[in-house]
Structures are given as structure tokens and as C-alpha cells.
Amino acid sequence: MGIITVLWEKWAEFKRDFYKITVAAMISPLMYLLVFGLGIQTTSHGEPYLNFLIPGIVAMVSMTGSFSAVSQNMSVQRLYEKALDQVMVSPTPLWQFIVGQIVGGALRGMYAVLVILLLVSPIRTSLVFNWVSFLILFLNGTVFSTIAVTLSFLAKSYTDAPRFNTYIIMPMSFLCNTFFSTDQMPHGIKEFVSALPLSQTSDMVRSIAAGGDPTVTGVLILFAYLIVFSAISFMFIYKKKNL
């Protein structure tokens, strides 16, 4: 019941800010498509660059949409509205509150994905996005929602949420197999970047879009991130409850 309550809150917020959320989901990815995809006519791995770029942007959007849906709201609720304190004294199990935040954030990320896919649908490509793609993107969204929940417990002020976006989300947006392949990166850096969740998601979504299959290793890496950051989130919230 607690999960449904949190999701209902997310739904009410989505309906209230529908136009703002939709426009925010469109602008940056659309600019990347126009500048990198249509403005720079080139090839990647012997195919049109758009075939490489679009899956990377779709993966990136699932990350940014999920992360932004949780990080700032959770920080404000915890620091200023003291909503988290009210949750702790309510009969709602704390794990359900966390799971609701994670699922709600991932669903917001999937909405952003659908918006981008609608925008690129007039572009003629051979790319395929199927239910496996959406499962991978949803899993990626849960990972970054969980990271956002974890970081919201570390925020000391309202301004920390945008800083987390600058320190974590923006570097991954450009480095993690989205706009260019990680193959040419120096050893050490290449292995580190390739192990990040967005790199794995971009690679798997791109493989599926080209008619291939996701890798078991990639799925396991995403689940590993999800489990680790979920455990940290639960630790933070239950520790605060026992203070």
C-alpha cells in the first residue's frame, strides 16, 4: 500500500507539471540529435552515425529522467518539508517508501524515453526498439533512481542536488558510450567507464536496436548497482529512524 501511495504522489506531480516535464525531457536530447546527429554527417563502425547516436541518447534519457525525478524532490522533502520524518512516524513501512521512489523515478525515465522515441520516429533508420529494450531501460532507470535516493540522504542543502547532477550525471552523459565509443579510450579509463551503468545500458540497447541480444554481464552489472545502492538507501533511512 505504501508503494502505491508514493506512486500516486508521483502521478499527481506528473499531472500537475506535465508540460514542464515533457518540455524538459525534449530539449537537451533534441539539441544533441540536431547538433551531433543531423549537423555532423559521419559514420560510426561503418554505419550512419545516427544508428549509433539514437540508442545512446535513449539510454541517456532514461538515466537523466529517472535521476532528476527523484534527487531534487527527495532532497527538498528531507531537508525543508520534513516529509521524511512524517513517513518515519507513519505506519508505512520504510522499505515501501524507498521502493515507491525508485519505481516512480524509473517510470518517469521511461516517459522521457517514449518522448524521445516519438521525436525520432520520422527519421528513417533500421533501429529496432522492442520489449527487451524497454526492460533494459527500465532497469537502468531503477539504478539511477536508487542512486538519486542515496545521494538525497547525503545532501546538506537544496543546492546539493544540482551539484550531484554536475558531478555524476553530466560526465556519464558524455563519456558512457553515448556520443562516441569507449573503444579508443586509454586503458584503465576505458575499463572504468565501461563498467558504469550507463555504458552497459547504451551498449545493450544499441545491440538490441541492431538486431542483437543484451549481454548477461551487462544485466548482472546493472543488478549489482541496483542492489548496492538499494542497500545503502535502506541503511541511511533505517539509521535515521533509529537516531
Image (cartoon, rainbow, N blue to C red):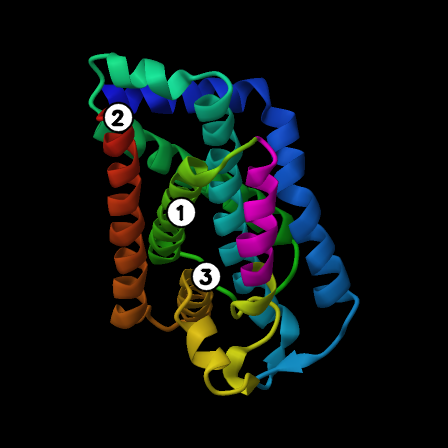
Residue 206 position within the rendered picture, expressed as x and y whole percent measured from the top left = 47, 68
Q: CA distance from mark 2 to mark 3?
A: 35 Å
Residue segment shown in magenta:
158-172
- Is disc 1 placed on a helix, strand or loop? helix
Residue 121 visible in the shown view: no
**In the image, is 131 to the left or to the right of 11?**
left
**In the image, is 183 to the left or to the right of 179?**
left
**Looking at the rendering, in which quadrant would you find the C terminus?**
top left
- Three-letter code, disc 3: Leu
Number of on-image labels: 3
**Residue 184 falls in which quadrant of the image?**
bottom right
**Cβ atoms under marks 1 and 3 closer than 8 Å:** no
Q: Which residue is disc 3 drawn over?
A: 198
**Which is nearer the N-term, disc 1 or disc 3?**
1
Q: Which residue is disc 2 drawn over?
A: 243
Q: Counting other residues with Cα less than 10 Å from the Cα at mark 1, is it few (<14), some (14-19), or many (20 or more)?
A: many
Residue 28 position within the rendered picture, expressed as x and y whole percent measured from the top left = 68, 49
- Is disc 2 placed on a helix, strand or loop? loop
Residue beneath the point at 29% across and 29% down:
240
Q: Counting other residues with Cα less than 10 Å from the Cα at mark 2, is it few (<14), some (14-19), or many (20 or more)?
A: few
**In the image, is 119 to the left or to the right of 41?**
left
Q: Residue furthest front?
A: 243
- Three-letter code, disc 1: Ile
Does residue 4 sit above or below 172 in this rendering? above
Front tag of 1 and 2 = 2
- Front-most of residues 190 and 214: 190
- Magenta stretch contains residue 113: no
Residue 33 visible in the shown view: yes
Does residue 209 sit above or below 162 in this rendering? below
**Looking at the rendering, in which quadrant would you find the N terminus?**
top left
Q: Counting other residues with Cα less than 10 Å from the Cα at mark 3, is it few (<14), some (14-19), or many (20 or more)?
A: many
**Residue 74 falls in which quadrant of the image?**
top left
